[in-house]
Image (cartoon, rainbow, N blue to C red):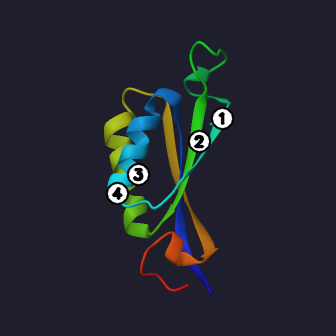
Amino acid sequence: MKIRLKKVTIVAESLLRPQLLKLLSAQGATGHTITLAEGSGSRGVRASEWEGRNIQIDTIVDQATADALMREIAARFFDHFAVIAYASDVEVLRGEKFVPGSPS
């Protein structure tokens, strides 16, 4: 059986990795995937290894957790770091892996 959840995607400077993972854990996210990311945007191109690579963190959570994560990310990081975050609707199987107590 599939259930509807939210995928929260965060693209950030790699130096924020420990803080972001701590935030995910504190908000109840049960897992995440991290990939290296490259690109350009309003803050320009991050083009050198000296600056450090960007990371993309994806986590699947319920609506309340997604909302809380988005609020905390905006409050803690947006003013001082190159960070974007967005949430999208997803349908997943084995929902109990992402949200304990959800139907499987």
Q: At 40% across and 35% down in the image, what residue appears?
A: 78
Above/below status of 27 relative to 79: below
Residue 54 image offset from top left, x and y in percent: 59, 30
Disc 4 residue type? Answer: Gln
Residue 9 image offset from top left, x and y in percent: 55, 50
Given residues 73 and 44, the one toward you in this image is: 73
Q: CA distance from mark 2 to mark 4?
A: 18 Å
Q: Earlier in the sequence, mark 3 or mark 1?
A: 3
Q: CA distance from mark 3 to mark 2?
A: 13 Å
Mark 2 vs 1: CB contact within 8 A: yes
Disc 2 residue type? Answer: Gln
Q: CA distance from mark 4 to mark 3?
A: 5 Å
**Residue at mark 2:** 56
- Sort mark 4 into few (<14), some (14-19) or many (20+) by Cα contacts within 10 Å: some
**Residue at mark 3:** 24
**Residue at mark 4:** 27
- Sort mark 1 into few (<14), some (14-19) or many (20+) by Cα contacts within 10 Å: some
The quadrant in which the C terminus is found is: bottom right
Q: Earlier in the sequence, mark 2 or mark 1?
A: 1
Q: Is residue 62 left or right of residue 52?
A: left
Q: Label 1, secondary structure: give it.
A: strand
